[in-house]
Amino acid sequence: MYTAYKVFLDSIVPYAKTRYFELYGKVLKVGTTLTLDGLTHPSKSTYCQLLNEDLDIVATTYYPFAPDFTMESPGVVEEHFDDLVALYSSLDQPIYFAECGYASSETCNSSEELQAQFFSEVFLAWDKHYDHIKYLTIFKSTDWSMADVEFFGEYYGIDDPVFLEYLRTLGVRTWDGDGTNKLAYEFILCELEARDWCAVDCALTELATNKSTENIHIYPNPAKGQLTINASIGIDQITIYNSIGQSVLSTNETNIAINQLKPGIYIAYIGLSDQTYMTQKFVKQ
């Protein structure tokens, strides 16, 4: 199958490039979209490299789920990106993520908090490999309606309720009339704003402007019952914000009981004794 598809690519790509240039006067960059698992799996990667060897870009989709359509931990993202870049390390053949998504349904062993954490991990891994990864599409903006899910279930020939919930909750906004933002949507805005990639408003944007360069250590992360924050200078005040920018805890103690916080992603705003501040993200399990 791979060999036959390689013959097809070798035949059609030169024609597509020539025709595109005739129509638009521009060079067409061509890739073929494969799953990240396929690109990096030991039994498949050699065949995928055969397909990609003469193409302009490496195109991939990325949904880290197990065979039963439950979601893997967001902690796998960096390793997966590392593995992909190790195989496609040439800067002359950039990597494009045609799709990147993570379901938020509890049925899939996920949640809105885990979905938000996933996209934060994606941005961090993208930062690490920015020279290689030049494009990423978040899939998808809004959950599908049940009618859509039933249609796609029939299309794929799969009626497994876990699979259907996986499809239904890939959006970063809910499906209920006008829809509402999930936590992932808010965190994506914050990640975009932090990199100054577009004009967006992040609910967690710091009000202060005097940001410190001090080293801050926050642990454990993820945390369950207690969070400890250490700085090289004194800490005056710590305020913890939830994912939509609401203050949920304020203290001047560096050993903080967080049992009362709901599981999710939080920002610790740390005011230091020299009138500067730092922020640190952490996960409450």
Image (cartoon, rainbow, N blue to C red):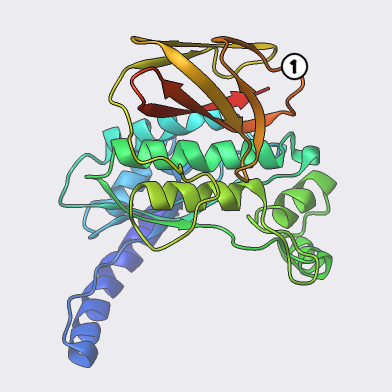
Q: Dividing the image into 4 quarters, which one contains the C terminus?
A: top right
Among the 4 quarters of the image, the one containing residue 250:
top right
Q: Amino acid at mark 1?
A: Asn
Q: Dividing the image into 4 quarters, which one contains the N terminus?
A: bottom left
The mark tally for this picture is 1
Q: Callout 1: few (<14), some (14-19), or many (20+) C-alpha neighbours within 10 Å? A: some
- Rendered view: 24 above or below 183: below
Residue tagged by mark 1?
259
- Rendered view: 261 above or below 56: above
Q: Which residue is located at x 28 percent, y 33 percent?
A: 86
State left or right for residue 29 relative to residue 228.
left
Q: Position of residue 252 (x, y in %)?
A: 56, 15
State left or right for residue 192 relative to residue 237.
left
Q: Position of residue 191 (x, y in %)?
A: 44, 46
State left or right for residue 205 relative to residue 247.
left
Among the 4 quarters of the image, the one containing residue 200:
bottom left
State left or right for residue 166 relative to residue 196.
right
Q: In front here: 267 or 117?
A: 267
> Is residue 143 something that shows in the picture?
yes
- Rendered view: 155 above or below 273: below
Q: Which residue is located at x 30 percent, y 74 percent?
A: 12
Q: Give SS at disc 1.
A: loop
Q: Which residue is located at x 59 percent, y 41 percent?
A: 116
Q: Position of residue 187 (x, y in %)?
A: 54, 46
Among the 4 quarters of the image, the one containing residue 178:
bottom right
Q: Position of residue 152 (x, y in %)?
A: 73, 65
- Rendered view: 174 above or below 262: below
Q: In front here: 127 or 219?
A: 219
